[in-house]
């Protein structure tokens, strides 16, 4: 159902009236559902939200139905203080939403944590996947963790930095890009994360990175990794920012090794938010790839 109460009053480049899905736990999950035609589903990461995909949505919505949820705790979705915020729960919410929307076939676009969440769904439903677009992300365990992120996982200090001082979402507005964000774009990225309570998911996502088998989300991520084999022969487009301090060239190489048939576009001057730094270049290849996956001319 459409819920205009979710719509921010004045966010630059975000002309959407998000809709609402109620999760199994009774929480409101906000999502953009715009355009008509074959579906394109977009899964964001941390600390962004559906705003990350605003320009991709408007580039595709004349020929495609574009769906971009805000994970629970992110964007315009509810931010419950007592929800577990584990990978399994995010995958379950994502799956339930796509089931509710009766998405039987789509091109899936993933970025950052959206890789593990989106591929967690895709690997279990390969028959519903027309194609995959990978943007600076991972869906497999790795020993690589940037120290700037590792600090945010430390007990006590991590909560103070991430939730108290906004030391994750705010730095992302200049550390995740190589091009300076306009003030109004920066404000929009930060819009949902304006208090200690509203930054709970930002912190919990950092804590939920499984670095060892004892971590509560390790087995879930291992299942996601194993399920990638079911997607091995799906069309894939990799659009990668080469200046990403987090998902660096190690991860880019892993995707290319695991999916050697994938089309790859490497943008050496772009950062983690590749859709901010290299949008014109991405739009030269991504719409055509999506149409090809859906059998359109």
Image (cartoon, rainbow, N blue to C red):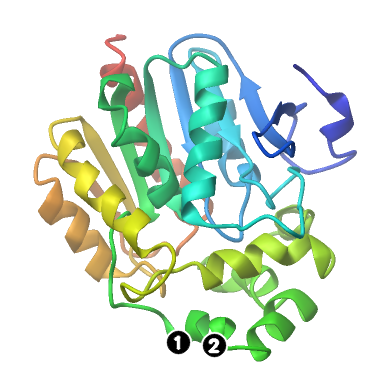
- What residue is disc 1 on? 147
Q: Residue 96 or 19: which is nearer the viewer?
A: 96
> Disc 2 to disc 1, how far (Cα)?
6 Å
Judge whether 25 appears above or below 131 on screen.
Answer: below
Q: Is residue 27 left or right of residue 45?
A: right
Residue assigned mark 2: 151
| 242 up-or-down from 91: above or below | below
Q: Position of residue 16 (x, y in %)?
A: 73, 28
Q: Position of residue 119 (x, y in %)?
A: 35, 42
**Label 2 neighbour load within 10 Å: few <14, some 14-19, many 20+:** some
Identity of the residue drawn at 44% across and 66% down? 216
Q: Secondary structure at mark 2?
A: helix
- Mark number for residue 175? none
Q: Residue at x 56, y 17 (%)?
A: 101
Q: Is residue 278 visible?
A: no
Q: Against 212, is 54 above or below?
A: above
Q: Tags 2 and 1 in contact by the CB under 8 Å rule?
A: yes
Residue 64 visible (yes or no): yes
The answer to which of 296 and 69 lies nearer the viewer is 69
Q: Residues within 10 Å of mark 1 (few under 14, many from 20)?
A: few
Element type at mark 1? helix
Quarter of the image with the N terminus is top right
The answer to which image quadrant residue 30 occupies is top right
List x then y, in percent, for residue 258: 13, 51
- Front in this rendered view, residue 122 or 18: 122
In the picture, measured across the screen, residue 6 lies left or right of residue 216, that is right
Residue 19 image offset from top left, x and y in percent? 73, 25
Q: Quadrant of the C terminus?
A: top left
Residue at position x 38%, y 78% in the image = 145
Q: How many marks are shown on the rendered structure?
A: 2
């Amino acid at each position: 159902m459409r819920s205009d109460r979710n719509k921010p009053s004045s966010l630059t480049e975000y002309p959407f009236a998000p809709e609402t899905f109620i999760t199994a736990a009774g929480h409101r999950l906000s999502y953009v559902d715009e355009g008509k035609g074959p579906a394109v589903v977009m899964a964001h990461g941390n600390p962004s939200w559906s705003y990350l995909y605003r320009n991709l949505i408007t580039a595709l919505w004349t020929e495609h139905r574009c769906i971009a949820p805000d994970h629970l705790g992110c964007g315009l979705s509810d931010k419950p203080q007592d929800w577990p915020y584990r990978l399994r729960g995010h995958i379950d919410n994502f799956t339930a939403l796509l089931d509710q929307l009766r998405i039987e076939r789509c091109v899936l676009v993933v970025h950052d944590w959206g890789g593990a969440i989106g591929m967690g769904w895709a690997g279990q439903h390969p028959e519903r996947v027309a194609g995959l677009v990978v943007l600076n992300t991972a869906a497999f365990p790795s020993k690589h963790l940037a120290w700037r992120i590792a600090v945010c996982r430390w007990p006590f200090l991590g909560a103070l930095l991430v939730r108290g001082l906004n030391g994750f979402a705010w730095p992302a507005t200049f550390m995740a890009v190589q091009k300076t964000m306009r003030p109004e774009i920066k404000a929009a990225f930060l819009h949902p994360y304006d208090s200690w309570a509203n930054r709970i998911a930002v912190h919990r996502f950092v804590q939920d990175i499984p670095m060892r088998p004892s971590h509560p989300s390790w087995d879930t991520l291992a299942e996601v990794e194993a399920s990638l084999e079911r997607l091995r022969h799906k069309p894939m487009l990799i659009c990668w920012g080469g200046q990403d301090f987090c998902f660096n060239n190690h991860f880019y190489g892993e995707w290319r090794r695991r999916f050697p048939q994938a089309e790859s576009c490497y943008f050496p001057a772009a950062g983690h938010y590749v859709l901010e730094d290299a949008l014109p270049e991405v739009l030269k290849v991504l719409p055509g790839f999506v149409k090809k996956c859906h059998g359109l001319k």
